Image (cartoon, grey):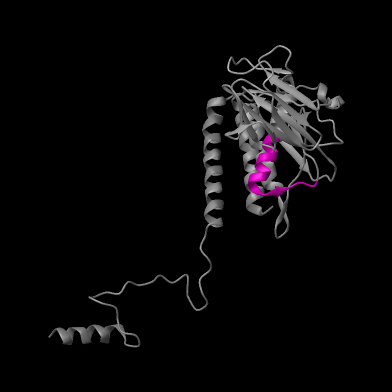
Amino acid sequence: MGILDSFEKGLERVVNGAFARAFKSGLQPLEVTAALRRELDTKAAVVARDRILAPNRFEVHLSRADHARMTELGPALLDELTDLVQRHAKAQHYAFAGGISIKLVLDPSVAEGTVRVESQNVKGSVAWTPVLDIAGKRYPITKPRTVIGRGSDADITVDDSGTSRQHIEILWDGTRGQVNDLGSTNGSKLNGQPLTKAPLPADSVIEIGRTRIVFRVLAQAADVDQFAESPVGPDERTDPPRPPAGVPAAALGLRLLRHLLAALRFVRAARASAPAPVAAGDDPGRPRRRAEGPGPARPGVPAHRAGASRGAGAR
């Protein structure tokens, strides 16, 4: 990580921490996802011409209040965070040494409304965890065969009159998926095409009636229980620091710091897109003088003589 990257990350940590203390508010899951993306981009390292290695074990450090709110969301939150890390890594062409593990850690040194992410590369086996996203809810596939339909005897019941009582089945053998239509009245579609029986790759979209089902496969660490409770230490019995007084005075300075952070990011982007160095023999520090008169001077002729020649020609 370069000096500019280190300074930006440190400044962002100071600004976010100060804002959280000045404007006390609970942390939102969206802020956790943003912190995970930043951690991935910061720690990603080029290990070969076509391989960028990114961390796969994450500890999300939260205050007592934020930790309590996040853990109330249950395993679905960790599934969502794992899916986000996996998708961001795929978009950036990152590779992992093993499965993805995300743990929520209670940390009394973290102020409410802020988050600190620590990560590392850990080599290990991968557990492929299939899930279904239906109408804003996530359903893990825990059996080799999962039936979906509007009937109460289906494994996953959907409230859709356009579906049959047992509409489709999802088969999973531990590494591969398959979807079969169970002779439904209105039929099914897989990625926009009519479906009878087909392999089910990750990120496929199944349509039954008016219901849209997204099949995802999460690459989670096989040897880590990321749903386990965080260890409780003696320091965790202390209360997190309270926000300081004087909010209006602090707000102005904090806004200025945020503007500085935005300017710093602009400088980084400008530096990344800067043109190639000038060729040898050019003087980048000397400004180019614009030729005066009706046309440029001839090569090898002093400017004042060239001007005199043009004047004579005019006469």
- Position in image of residue 166 (x %, y %): 69, 18
Magenta stretch: give its range: 83-97
Q: Is any atom of residue 59 visible in this view? A: yes
Q: Is residue 178 above or below residue 308?
A: above
Q: Quadrant of residue 239?
A: top right
Q: Is residue 165 above or below residue 311?
A: above
| 89 is within the stretch colored magenta | yes
Main secondary-structure element of the magenta-colored stretch: helix
Front residue of 72/246: it is 72
Q: Quadrant of the C terminus?
A: bottom left
Front residue of 159/25: it is 159
- Would residue 278 be found to the left or right of residue 119 on screen? left
- Position in image of residue 121 (x %, y %): 80, 46
Front residue of 216/48: it is 216
- Position in image of residue 253 (x %, y %): 54, 35
- Would residue 83 be found to the left or right of residue 207 on screen? right
- Position in image of residue 27 (x %, y %): 65, 26
